[in-house]
Amino acid sequence: MAETKTINAVETTLEIVEALKNRQPAGVSTVAEAVSVPVSTAYMHLNTLRQQGYVVKEAGNYRLSLRFLEHGGAVRQQLDFFTVVKDEVNQLTYLTGEIAGFAVEEQGQRVVLYRSEGSGAVGDQIPIGEYAHLHWTSLGKAILAHLPTERIDKIIDRHGLPANTPRTITDKEELLTELDAIRRAGYAVDDAERRRGIRGIAVPVLDADEEIIGSVGVAGPKMRFGERYMAELFDTLSEKRNVIEVRNEFYQ
């Protein structure tokens, strides 16, 4: 029973942080409206965050400070395989010239752990650390396909299957069918399901027990990402996936 108890003030502060992330810079009235609290309450939370160094006030508006970047970087560095991931993703961008990235699953969503842009990169300018629905992207679907069935059901129940483009899969049975195909093929494809005109391909990265630890992928303009090119990218991704898995085992 104790696990269900929360502190309302902390919840409000975190809601304000989330609101600022999506709207910054923003005035206190905008923040108050976004989290449905009185202006005076929003002001007290924002002022506390500012005094603690987590919010910056400029010209009467508020934005998140770079303190969050510091904490995010520290968390990422603590992940044993981050150095391995960074090296191989950078190699991917060098070899392909495209946008490459590595993602993990946290709380039922896809989180970009690292990304890099090659010389010819064109695509989704997503920030490192971004959370998104797993069914929207090739990185997310590659992970989702290799989670236990009960976990997949819980993620869908919690987050639903909202659309981000007309091509996003929003039907559970259709998604489950695609996840089965991903497991058999060894890769996942995002066919303009997150962003119009952007196509991506990703492969799962597994540990020694064949459990999913993340996914690595490449994305770019749909016109350039034809079937022959996607096949070439799959071979390159498979090689990088193998290197990450082997080096990850070495560091265990």
Image: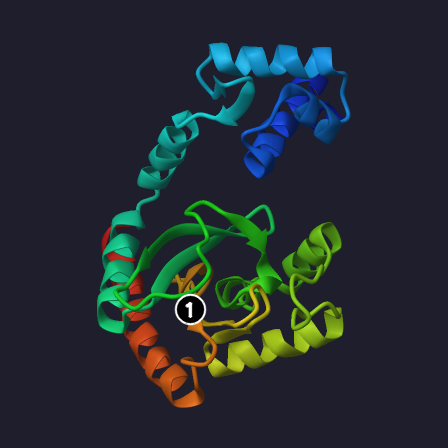
| Left/right of residue 145 with respect to residue 235 in the rendered view | right
Instruction: Using a 10 Å C-alpha cutoff, classify the residue at mark 1 as few (fewer than 14 neighbours), some (14 to 19) or many (20 or more).
Output: many
Rendered residue at 62%/77% (across/down): 178
**Residue 29, image x, y percentages:** 70, 21
Instruction: State whether residue 52 is above or below residue 135.
Output: above
**Residue 234, image x, y percentages:** 37, 79
Identify the residue at the far bottom of this view.
Answer: 228
Q: Quadrant location of the N terminus? A: top right
Colour mode of the rendering? rainbow
Q: Secondary structure at mark 1?
A: strand
| Left/right of residue 91 with respect to residue 131 in the rendered view | left
**Residue 83, image x, y percentages:** 25, 49
In front of the other: 4 or 18: 18
Identify the residue at the far front of this view.
Answer: 59
Rendered residue at 57%/52% (across/down): 132
**Residue 24, image x, y percentages:** 55, 32
In front of the other: 194 or 121: 121
Q: Quadrant of residue 90?
A: bottom left
Rendered residue at 43%/85% (across/down): 226
How many callouts does the rendering have?
Answer: 1
| Left/right of residue 231 with respect to residue 84 in the rendered view | right
Which residue in the protein does label 1 denote? 219
Rendered residue at 56%/64% (across/down): 195
Q: Quadrant of residue 164?
A: bottom right
Q: Amino acid at mark 1?
A: Ala
Instruction: State whether residue 97 is above or below residue 75.
Output: below
In front of the other: 221 or 240: 221
